[in-house]
């Protein structure tokens, strides 16, 4: 009975598969197989966790049958469109934000997090080599990163 109740869900997921043109910042065109909507979007700082925790989370969740978006698995080198990433985040059932020591140094990570918050979709936080209070209260490496963003004029105090 359980396999029967899952079958329509699998068929519905296949209905959203399509091949779509995907523009490249390098000026070349590529085709990217998009599978929307995704169940999960993983927000992370690549140099900190892409090949460790993010890859483990991706492999675990896809092994459970979930459709997971992790940029290293879904994008080709040179391919990038912010609107495509926003579409994936908007359509995901939930988000995972992996907060790591260098996460707040990345304007892109912060922009994705800000967008995820605006979608109202549930965010599951992972804390990798940082304490939740460091993130919540902008302490330690997060205070340093936010201070650098402010000095560079990237963000106002209110936005930070």
Image (tube, rainbow, N blue to C red):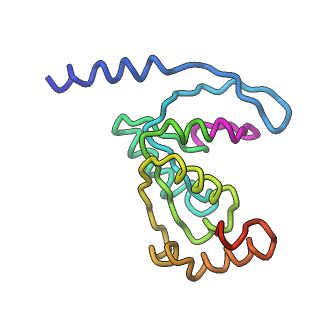
Identify the image quadrant of residue 30.
top right
Measured from the top left, where is residue 133 in percent x and y?
46, 78
Residue at the far right: name it.
Answer: 27
Quarter holding the N terminus is: top left
Residue at 48 percent across and 58 percent down: it is 53
- What's drawn in magenta, residue-wise? 72-85
Query: Going by the image, does 61 lie left or right of 18?
Result: left
Residue at the (65%, 66%) spot, across then down: 159
Q: Residue at x 70, y 23 (%)?
A: 21
Q: Is residue 132 left or right of residue 82?
A: left
Looking at the image, residue 141 lies above or below residue 11: below
Name the image quarter holding residue 113: bottom right
Image quadrant for the C terminus? bottom right
Decide if residue 89 is on the left or right side of residue 158: left
Left or right for 126, reference 146: left
143 or 70, nearer to the observer: 143
Position of residue 78 relative to residue 109, above or below, is above
């Amino acid at each position: 009975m359980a396999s029967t109740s899952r079958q329509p869900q699998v068929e519905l997921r296949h209905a959203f598969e399509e091949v779509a043109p995907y523009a490249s910042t390098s000026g070349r065109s590529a085709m990217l197989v998009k599978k929307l909507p995704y169940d999960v979007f993983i927000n992370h700082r690549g140099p900190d966790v892409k090949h460790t925790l993010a890859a483990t989370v991706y492999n675990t969740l896809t092994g459970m049958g979930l459709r997971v978006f992790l940029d290293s698995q879904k994008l080709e080198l040179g391919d990038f469109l912010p609107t495509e990433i926003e579409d994936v985040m908007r359509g995901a059932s939930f988000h995972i934000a992996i907060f790591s020591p260098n996460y707040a140094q990345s304007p892109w990570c912060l922009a994705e997090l800000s967008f995820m918050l605006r979608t109202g979709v549930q965010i599951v936080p992972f804390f990798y080599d940082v304490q939740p209070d460091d993130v919540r209260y902008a302490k330690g490496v997060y205070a340093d990163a936010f201070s650098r963003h402010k000095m560079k004029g990237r963000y106002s105090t209110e936005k930070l």
